């Protein structure tokens, strides 16, 4: 039966010659992160409630906050999906039915599920709410994808261990109405699409129930039983001991190929990451997708032949990272896709703050009101991250508190005013991010 379906769907093989641009799906670990993701161009966001979510230590949303988040997103014409993606034990299921009904009542745009039992319950209780399959369901082949399609899943988030060719084969075997979503950016788990047992083994915190302690980022050593207290480094090469520490996924330069396959949604990982990380990464991917759109409108090139200018990757390198890998997209990853010597690479830029307000033209408009995230001083230069790929630099001419008392330094957690040269021409926006280059 499956082979017949695959053959039938191959006859109407779904590619994307017209260049329909996929949805850009961003993480919303808190309300503030959701607002920032939307500001920088996300088409949809995903978040979790206080229960049933795989990111128990993210900010997460109470039921009231989920309702407010849906309302805010819908007012901006943005979709909001809620994670219900734990691999549940019986004790985890208390209250699930009423929670699913609540998600239906507040009109979420979809729920993300990995557990077949939760999926069956959702189909019974809230049949009209679209079901998205989590990457933890480990869809790695067309037959697997067809199985979940037959269960009524409307969108499949594929396993991260797939090549571009395998993704294309899965796409071609599915009905056109079944959507495909893939992760394009963010942290990678050392285990198959996040099904890790190390955290539970070492700490008692179950990664598959939302409590991951991230043991893949630990520094390991060897202890020989007859030499207590003597620790020997575990080295795969001459560098170091972070033996499970993968570089971060980055498929930015493969966006044209992914668009051509007909992927419906491009997902950024990061509900546990900072507001700055979410905004800065969404900004780059939004700008890249807009660049692809503009190139296609020129009619001069096929989708696959489009090349992103270097500035897009240069901007991503200014966001905190472990380095980047394209993972399995062309071949299985090797030693060059790991970061053995330290938990992350050194950052050259750090977040400085977020714009809360700014002066209007013709009204002494050369001031900003900033919520401070990292210290900065009068005379330093900051960079403003606009909603395109260009960052605009300016000097802090004056630094004031909210009572207009001069300051020498702005400290995290405070709100300050900045004055800059009136000749600076920047299109400020509330919720825009500021960064600064680290000294040295």
Image (cartoon, rainbow, N blue to C red):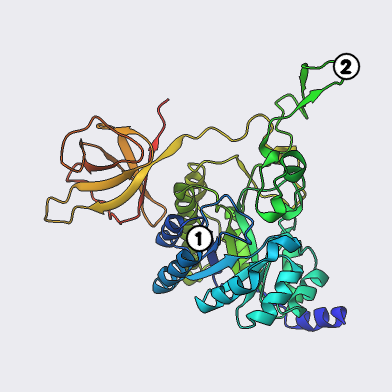
Q: What x and y, as percent, mark residue 360? A: 18, 56
Front residue of 358/90: it is 90
Front residue of 163/276: it is 276
Q: What x and y, as percent, mark residue 53? A: 62, 59
Q: Is residue 117 above or below residue 354?
A: below
Q: Residue at x 31, y 50 (%)?
A: 355
Residue position for label 2: 226
- Which mark, by number, is residue 283? none
Seen in the image, is 372 located left or right of residue 348? Answer: left
Secondary structure beneath disc 2? loop
Q: What x and y, as percent, mark residue 112? A: 63, 67
Tell me the quarter of the picture where residue 339 sits: top right
Task: Inspect this view and state whether residue 329 appears.
Answer: no
Q: Residue at x 80, y 84 (%)?
A: 8
Seen in the image, is 69 located left or right of residue 341? Answer: left
Q: What x and y, as percent, mark residue 54? A: 64, 56
Q: Residue at x 47, y 34 (%)?
A: 348
Front residue of 337/10: it is 337
Quote the CA–CA distance across marks 2 and 1.
50 Å
Task: Inspect this view and state whether residue 68 appears.
Answer: yes
Q: Residue at x 74, y 34 (%)?
A: 243
Q: Is tag 2's residue or tag 1's residue first in the polypeptide sequence?
A: 1
Asked if labels 1 and 2 touch by Cβ distance under 8 angstroms, the answer is no
Tell me the quarter of the picture where residue 1 sits: bottom right
Tell me the quarter of the picture where residue 404 sits: top left
Residue position for label 1: 61
Of the 4 image quadrants, the one containing the C terminus is: top left
């Amino acid at each position: 039966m499956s082979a017949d379906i695959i053959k039938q769907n191959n006859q109407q093989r779904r590619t994307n010659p017209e260049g329909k641009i996929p949805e850009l799906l961003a993480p919303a670990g808190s309300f503030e992160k959701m607002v920032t993701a939307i500001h920088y161009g996300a088409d949809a966001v995903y978040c979790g409630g206080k229960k049933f979510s795989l990111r128990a230590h993210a900010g997460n949303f109470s039921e009231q906050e989920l309702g407010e988040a849906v309302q805010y997103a819908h007012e901006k014409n943005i979709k909001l999906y809620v994670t219900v993606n734990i691999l549940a034990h019986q004790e985890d299921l208390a209250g699930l039915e009423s929670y699913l009904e609540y998600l239906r009542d507040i009109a979420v745009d979809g729920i993300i599920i990995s557990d077949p039992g939760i999926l069956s319950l959702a189909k019974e209780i809230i049949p009209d709410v679209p079901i998205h399959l989590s990457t933890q369901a480990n869809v790695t082949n067309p037959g697997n994808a067809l199985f979940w399609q037959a269960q009524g899943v409307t969108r499949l988030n594929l396993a991260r261990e797939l090549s571009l060719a395998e993704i294309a084969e899965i796409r071609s075997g599915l009905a056109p109405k079944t959507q495909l979503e893939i992760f394009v950016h963010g942290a990678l788990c050392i285990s198959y699409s996040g099904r890790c047992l190390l955290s539970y083994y070492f700490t008692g915190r179950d990664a598959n129930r939302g409590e991951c302690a991230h043991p893949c980022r630990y520094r390991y050593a060897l202890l020989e039983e007859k030499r207590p207290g003597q620790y020997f480094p575990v080295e795969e090469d001459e560098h170091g001991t972070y033996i499970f520490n993968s570089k971060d996924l980055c498929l930015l330069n493969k966006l044209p190929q992914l668009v051509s396959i007909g992927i419906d949604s491009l997902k950024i990982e990061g509900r546990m990451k900072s507001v700055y990380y979410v905004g800065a990464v969404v900004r780059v991917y939004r700008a890249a997708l807009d660049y692809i759109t503009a190139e296609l409108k020129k009619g001069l090139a096929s989708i696959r032949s489009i090349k992103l200018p270097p500035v897009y990757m240069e901007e991503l390198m200014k966001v905190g990272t472990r380095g980047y890998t394209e993972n399995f997209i062309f071949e299985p990853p090797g030693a060059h896709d790991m970061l053995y010597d330290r938990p992350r690479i050194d950052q050259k830029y750090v977040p400085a703050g977020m714009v809360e307000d700014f002066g209007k033209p013709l009204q002494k408009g050369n001031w900003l009101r900033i919520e401070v995230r990292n210290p900065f001083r009068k005379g330093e230069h900051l960079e403003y991250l606009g909603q395109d790929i260009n960052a605009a630099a300016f000097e802090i001419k004056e630094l004031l508190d909210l009572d207009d008392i001069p300051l020498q330094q702005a400290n995290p957690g405070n709100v300050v005013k900045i004055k800059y040269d009136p000749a600076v021409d920047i299109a400020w926006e509330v919720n825009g991010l500021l960064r600064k280059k680290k000294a040295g």
